[in-house]
Image (tube, rainbow, N blue to C red):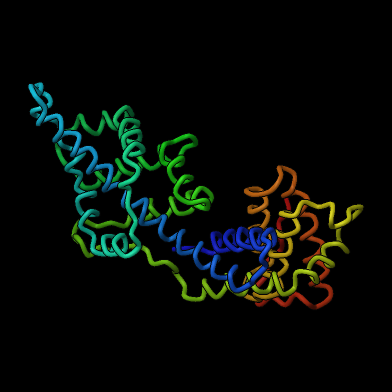
Amino acid sequence: MINRILLRIKVVQVLYAFYHSDNCDKAIAENELRHSLQKAYDLYFYLLALMVELTRFAEQKIDAARNKYLPTDKEKNPQMRFVENLFVKQLSENEQLNEYLKKRKLSWVNYQDALKRMYQEITESDFFADYMSVDEHSYDADKNLWKKIFKMEMSDGSPLLATLEDENAYWLSDVDIIGSFVFKTIKMFKQENASAQELLPMYKDPADLAFALKLFHTTIDCYEEFGKMIDEHVKNWEIDRIAFMDTLIMKTAIAELLSFPTIPTNVTLNEYIEIAKMFSTPRSSLFINGVLDQIAAYLKADNQLEKLVDFTRDTK
């Protein structure tokens, strides 16, 4: 599930912290990389659990209204479609989800206020009103409701994003990618699989963790060498005048170019341009694009860049 895009981001984030730390211990930094990847996988389960917890919150709210002194007719006979959502019922019984949440001690118990705000936002939406107006249950309709809820909660300023930022420093940068895997999971659920429905594994390919570790270590081991290479290809700039994040992104990109012959050059360069757009200054991506193009051309001409597969780079 954790793909190469997220692995590259994690390596850059941990390297940034490593070079800004007073204690530059590579073993500690590697452990932090492993921890960060584990926390990204935690986020996947945390978001799955959110669907169960919001449903439970709604059910408790209904029960409280029923049991209050002099409930109204509407409170005595509430519309139960949301809390009886067939998809969430199946998810709540999922063996893999419950085992993981217990093992990793993941819970929304300390975020009741956030659940309240999310639930209010959901119930005030037009798509929720449309969903609740239909009496007949449908498994597909129940899944589609949660796709719409997550799409809304992934927007800027949502209670969900504010909560994730409080819970873990890295999760805000992870949520778009991990959220896409939550959508994929909702889509792949089949009612007939019941509680045995499989969830996504931490890594699609066992080699992915090795990729991240090699990228991390190569960047550190060749840090000065890659710095000189960048300095030689930057026109009218001294390397110490370039934003640190920009040089770090370029050094990590060079490490990947030289260390992974099966990854096409254009794939590597395009991925680090996207990372620059996410984490550096607005103009950094254009600058990094130009410098990495020159370095890739130099390495290829010098027979240092031996790719098993390669494609012409589109720089438009």
Q: Farthest residue in the right direction?
A: 236
Q: How many marks?
A: 0
Vertical position of residue 298 compared to residue 45: above or below: below
Q: What residue appears at the point 80 percent right and 58 percent down from the top-left corner?
A: 291
Q: What residue appears at the point 67 percent right and 52 percent down from the top-left corner?
A: 276
Q: What residue appears at the point 75 percent right and 49 percent down from the top-left corner?
A: 286
Residue 130 location (% of width, % of height): 26, 30
Front-lying residue, 48 or 289: 48
Residue 111 location (% of width, % of height): 35, 42
Instruction: Decide if residue 210 is on the left or right side of residue 181.
Output: right
Instruction: Decide if residue 21 is on the left or right side of residue 139.
Output: right
Vertical position of residue 183 compared to residue 76: above or below: below
The answer to which image quadrant residue 4 occupies is bottom right
Residue 173 location (% of width, % of height): 54, 50
Front-lying residue, 308 or 73: 73
Instruction: Decide if residue 95 is on the left or right side of residue 265.
Output: left
Can I make out residue 73 in this image? no
Can I make out residue 106 in this image? yes
The answer to which image quadrant residue 136 occupies is top left
Residue 7 location (% of width, % of height): 55, 63
Q: What residue appears at the point 47 percent right and 72 percent down from the top-left corner?
A: 205
Instruction: Decide if residue 280 is on the left or right side of residue 204.
Output: right
- Image quarter where the N terminus lies is bottom left
